[in-house]
Amino acid sequence: MADEGLSIGQVARRTGLSVHTLRLYEREGLLASEVRRDGSGRRVYSAWDVEWLANCVKFRASGMPLTTISRLAQLVRAGSGNEAERLELLRAHQRHITEQFAQLRDCLDLINVKVASYERHLSAGASGDPWHQQRPPAPEEHRIDGA
């Protein structure tokens, strides 16, 4: 990256975020540092800004709320001395992701069972719905009274 920094358009291309989203992130305090301005008042981003925004993209993709990202950015901007709070924010999100992963694993296990069943059903040349196959009729009950 050039020493003079990157324009908002260049950062948008590098991060996959729209220019509108970059402006929103700045307004909402999601950036870990102040975005500089050039002599014409245009935003100039640093390599650190791009790295932080790449993290934000992953945080958002993982479901981290904007309020959590904002709090984390605020702590980073404040400097050292608040690492324990940063760690707790990340640990809380880590727990959330771990729970989501377990739920998704359970869903995937069900889907794998269904896929395997349909594959067996179709490879056997069976017809009809494998989940609603006809069951053999139950044997008739014999009444003691001879009826």
Image (cartoon, grey):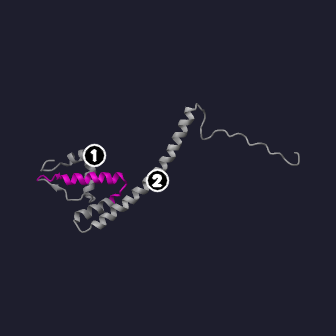
- The residue at the far right in this view is 146
Image spot of residue 1 (x, y percent): 16, 47
Residue beneath disc 2: 103
Q: Nearer the viewer, residue 121 or 14?
A: 121
Choose top left, top right, bottom left or bottom right for residue 94.
bottom left
Compared to 12, does 26 lie above or below? below
Q: Name the outermost residue toward the left.
A: 39
Q: Residue at x 13, y 48 (%)?
A: 2
Question: Which contiguous range is marked in magenta?
Answer: 39-67
Which residue does the numbered mark 1 point to in the structure image? 16
Residue 84 position in % (x across, y down): 30, 67
Mark 1 vs mark 2, CA separation in Å? 29 Å
Answer with left or right where residue 37 lies relative to residue 27.
left
Report the residue at 22% width, 63% height from top.
Answer: 77
Please give left or right for residue 64 compared with residue 45 in the image. Answer: right
* Quarter of the image where one finds residue 37: bottom left
Mark toward the start of the polypeptide (1 vs 2): 1
Q: How far from the left and from the top, in percent, is residue 80?
A: 22, 66
- Residue toward you, 15 or 92: 92
Tag 1–tag 2 contact (CB < 8 Å): no
Q: Amino acid at mark 1?
A: Gly
Residue 16 in the magenta stretch? The answer is: no
Picture coordinates of residue 116 (x, y %)? Answer: 52, 40
Q: Nearer the viewer, mark 1 or mark 2?
A: 2
**Which amino acid does the dot numbered 2 rest on?**
Gln
